[in-house]
């Protein structure tokens, strides 16, 4: 299992990054993979070699925008719980889990260091209960319902406010024709949402580990194509980062040995979790009202219990089986940020 950690390095590598860009441009132009050919540029050969391997062999690469200083495993030392890279004389604190097999590489940007770490994947435990997770485009982005204890976690309520805030800002900028600033605003929104997704998925997985539970998710792969929404709800659906949440839950669950299952999403929002009655028009905002037994409950909570119930009925699919069917492998995922390295004012 490969995780990538992001740490602020507090160094000025402006000169080295400029040289790295020149090396990448040379590699694209001449398609060389020998660091001897770029010795005149002045970048350390161990770093220049990695950049050439990346850009020279990529036949689709035509332009260089953002190059990082890449240091391979052989250029990295672990000394007294610190990471040392002799080529850059850079020290980094090992604040993350130290039980790793090896550090694959480090990529240095202008502000952050990206550390790729290889861990042994822990054995998945047999769950004593299951937590049904309802992912939403409005309200709380994650609602987790423990079917055995009845405990409910409601997470990420601020996402909808953030989307609406930046939506209004973009409208103003579009009218003013400030398109460069428009892109910066969009990037800032994405960083904030990603930060929130990191927090809520970490909370969910740690809770599941604590109570020895499995996590049950809906299969939402085609949701944007199949969902029928009113016009005013289309923005919420299109800005919904459910796939990012799913990826975070999956790789964090692997790290902690938490099993993840999938169920089909049909009728999870329309079925009463108390009596099982299904009614098409039984939603009133964030409330679910059962016309059969009279139950009134939060719609996300009700859906979460239904998702867990579907798994208990055996209508589910284990995430590893799903990965095997798709031919998926362990793709490196980005892990939690260092609390000091948060891009926006949302400390972990």
Image (cartoon, rainbow, N blue to C red):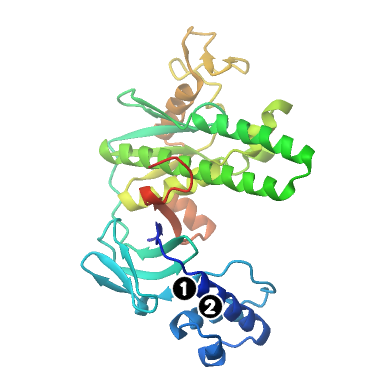
Image disc number at residue 51: 2
Instruction: Give the residue drawn at x 28%, y 54%.
Output: 123
Question: Would you say the residues marked 2 and 1 are in contact, meaning their CB atoms lie under 8 Å apart?
Answer: yes
Give the percent coordinates (x, y) of residue 158. 50, 30
Q: Is residue 23 left or right of residue 318?
A: right
Asked where in the image residue 102 lies, by quadrant, the reply is bottom left
128 to 19, vertically: above or below: above
- Residue that label 1 marks: 70
- Answer yes or no: is residue 330 visible: no
Query: What is the crowding at mark 1: few (fewer than 14 residues within 10 Å), some, or many (at least 20)?
Result: many
Q: Is residue 93 left or right of residue 312?
A: left
- Answer yes or no: is residue 347 visible: yes
Determine the CA span between mark 2 and mark 1.
7 Å
In the rendered image, the residue lying farthest to the bottom is 36
Image disc number at residue 20: none
Give the percent coordinates (x, y) of residue 340. 37, 49
Query: What is the crowding at mark 2: few (fewer than 14 residues within 10 Å), some, or many (at least 20)?
Result: many
Q: On the rendered image, what quadrant is the C terminus found in? A: top left
**Which residue is more in the foreground, 75 or 314?**
75
Give the percent coordinates (x, y) of residue 162. 56, 33
Secondary structure type for disc 2:
helix
Q: On the rendered image, what quadrant is the N terminus found in? A: bottom left
Secondary structure type for disc 1:
strand
**Which residue is more in the foreground, 9 or 187?**
9
Mark 2 or mark 1: whose residue is earlier in sequence: 2
Give the percent coordinates (x, y) of residue 289. 53, 12
In the rendered image, the residue lying farthest to the left is 80
**Which residue is more in the foreground, 63 or 259?**
63
Number of marks drawn: 2
Instruction: Give the residue drawn at x 35%, y 75%.
Output: 89
């Amino acid at each position: 299992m490969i995780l990538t950690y992001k740490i602020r390095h507090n160094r000025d590598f402006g000169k080295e990054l400029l040289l790295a860009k020149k090396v990448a441009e040379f590699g694209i132009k001449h398609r060389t993979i020998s660091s001897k050919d770029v010795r005149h540029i002045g970048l350390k050969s161990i770093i220049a070699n990695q950049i050439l391997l990346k850009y020279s062999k990529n036949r689709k690469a035509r332009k260089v925008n953002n190059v990082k200083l890449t240091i391979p495993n052989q250029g990295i030392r672990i000394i007294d719980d610190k990471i040392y890279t002799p080529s850059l004389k850079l020290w980094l604190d090992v604040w993350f889990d130290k039980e790793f097999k090896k550090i694959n590489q480090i990529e240095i940007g202008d502000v952050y260091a990206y550390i790729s770490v290889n861990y042994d994947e822990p054995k998945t435990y047999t769950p004593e209960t299951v937590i049904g997770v309802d992912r939403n485009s409005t309200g709380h982005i994650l609602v987790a319902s423990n079917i055995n204890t009845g405990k409910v976690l409601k997470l990420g309520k601020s996402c909808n406010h953030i989307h609406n805030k930046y939506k209004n800002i973009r409208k103003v900028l579009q009218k003013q024709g400030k398109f460069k600033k428009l892109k910066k605003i969009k990037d800032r929104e994405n960083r904030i949402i990603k930060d929130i997704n990191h927090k809520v998925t970490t909370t969910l997985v740690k809770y599941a580990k604590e109570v020895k539970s499995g996590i049950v998710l809906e299969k939402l792969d085609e949701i944007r194509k199949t969902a029928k929404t009113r016009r005013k709800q289309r923005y919420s659906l299109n800005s919904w980062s459910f796939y990012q949440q799913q990826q975070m839950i999956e790789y964090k669950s692997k790290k902690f040995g938490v099993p993840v299952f999938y169920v089909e999403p049909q009728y999870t929002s329309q079925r009463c979790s108390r009596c099982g009655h299904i009614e098409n028009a039984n939603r009133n905002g964030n409330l679910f009202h059962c016309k059969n037994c009279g139950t009134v409950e939060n719609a996300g909570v009700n859906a979460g219990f239904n998702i867990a119930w579907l798994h208990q009925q055996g209508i589910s699919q284990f995430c590893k089986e799903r990965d095997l069917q798709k031919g998926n492998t362990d793709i490196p995922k980005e892990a939690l940020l260092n609390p000091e390295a948060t891009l926006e004012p949302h400390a972990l």
